[in-house]
Amino acid sequence: MMGGRAWGHRHYYIRRSKFSNLCALPSYLYTFSLSLSLSIIALFEQHRGAMQNVARRGIHYMQKLNKAAGPSSGNGVVPPEMLREGQEEVIKASLSLIRERARLKGAIVRALGGAKSTSALLGVPLGHNSSYLEGPAFAPPFIREAMWCDSTNSTTEAGKDIKDPRVLSDCGDLPVQEIRDIGVTDERLMQVVSESVCLVMEHEPLCPIVLGGDHSISYPVVRAISSKLGGPVDILHLDAHPDIYDAFEGNRYSHASSFARIMEGGYARRLLQVGIRSINEEGREQGKRFGVEQYEMRNFSKDRQFLENLKLGEGVKGVYISVDVDSLDPGFAPGVSHHEPGGLSFREAMNILQNLQGNIVGADVVEFNPQRDVVDKMTAYVAAKFVRELAARISK
């Protein structure tokens, strides 16, 4: 679960250097401490492998056997047509629950009456397109838990009650890991994410707020919304990074490439990126290529008044908001994979979102990593607060 190549000995939460003072302990305590530390390291290794091994077991292994056997080997070969048919049946079943939940939630809101737009949660627990840690795949249930925690009430700052289904409904999670386990390609998986968003939008007046997951999900979500509405949207993107590489580390679906796919697909007219403080030459060149408006934190003091009075969405199908939790300074949100000091405060981010003028047609909250949320679920509450306040803005 702790992502791929970047997980090495230097990234263990319990570092080797911290064992240096154990020699001063009595031998029995030294043995116990070392054993406990090694057990914890093994546990993290086990967790890391849980998602990594999806690509090495079951159907994936069978595909390797097929390739090695070949048609003339005499060994059993699973027909590709049979595999594809089975994959599509699993995908169909996975989408069916989302469809029926959205159908019911939409019907309830319409029966209650008085709502033109209602926020609908959809979890997309996808983390394997992350370039560093894959913990964001586990975020949706932690965000929901924080949203409904008794430590606070259910009323947003604007006075809307998220217990009211006309303000917020929940359509559940797309079972991403189960779909990956049957051997689908990333291209097909992205199509399935888009299909799940379209299913939610079929049932008026539901409007999707998608819980990530890493930032790769923004591409299929925006694609679905743009396609469903029949045209491009304006995007307000809060992030420490522009996520606009053409194909980061060769992966066109990387979380660092999602906005390149959005812009080249013509799904957005304007893309405003706020909170940027980790950007290289390619990020700036890609920004120029696509006409992106990049607002870097080093200039925030002079940009602040403009950013707190944005007016977007006129002449297009509406406004999409993408909130990467690492747009905040890590002092406010430590539970992210990429700690970039010098970010927005929570109130600065909230002022931008609450003062925005425009018709919000969808949103996502991404890159919360519960595996790094070491301060009593602090970042889970931050992500939940973003969701609650976005729900208040969308519902009307």
Image (cartoon, rainbow, N blue to C red):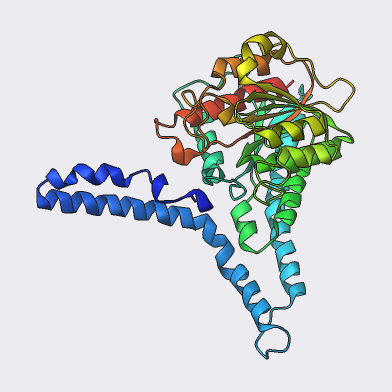
Image vertical order of residue 271 relative to residue 311, above or below: below
Q: Position of residue 88 (x, y in %)?
A: 74, 62
Instruction: Name the residue at the front extreme.
Output: 281
Q: Residue at x 76, y 35 (%)?
A: 286
Residue 72 as seen in the image, left or right of residue 350: right
Instruction: Name the residue at the bottom extreme.
Output: 74
Residue 10 as seen in the image, left or right of residue 81: left
The quarter in which the C terminus is drawn is top right
Q: Residue at x 61, y 20 (%)?
A: 297
Q: Position of residue 226 (x, y in %)?
A: 83, 36
Q: How many numbered circles are shown?
A: 0
Q: Position of residue 342 (x, y in %)?
A: 53, 22
Residue 317 as seen in the image, left or right of residue 117: right
Q: Quadrant of residue 177?
A: bottom right
Residue 6 as seen in the image, left or right of residue 357: left
For residue 202, say whether it is visible.
no
For residue 83, say whether it is visible.
yes
Q: Position of residue 284 (x, y in %)?
A: 72, 31
In this rendered view, identify the residue nearer to me: 35 or 24: 24
Image vertical order of residue 21 relative to residue 392, above or below: below
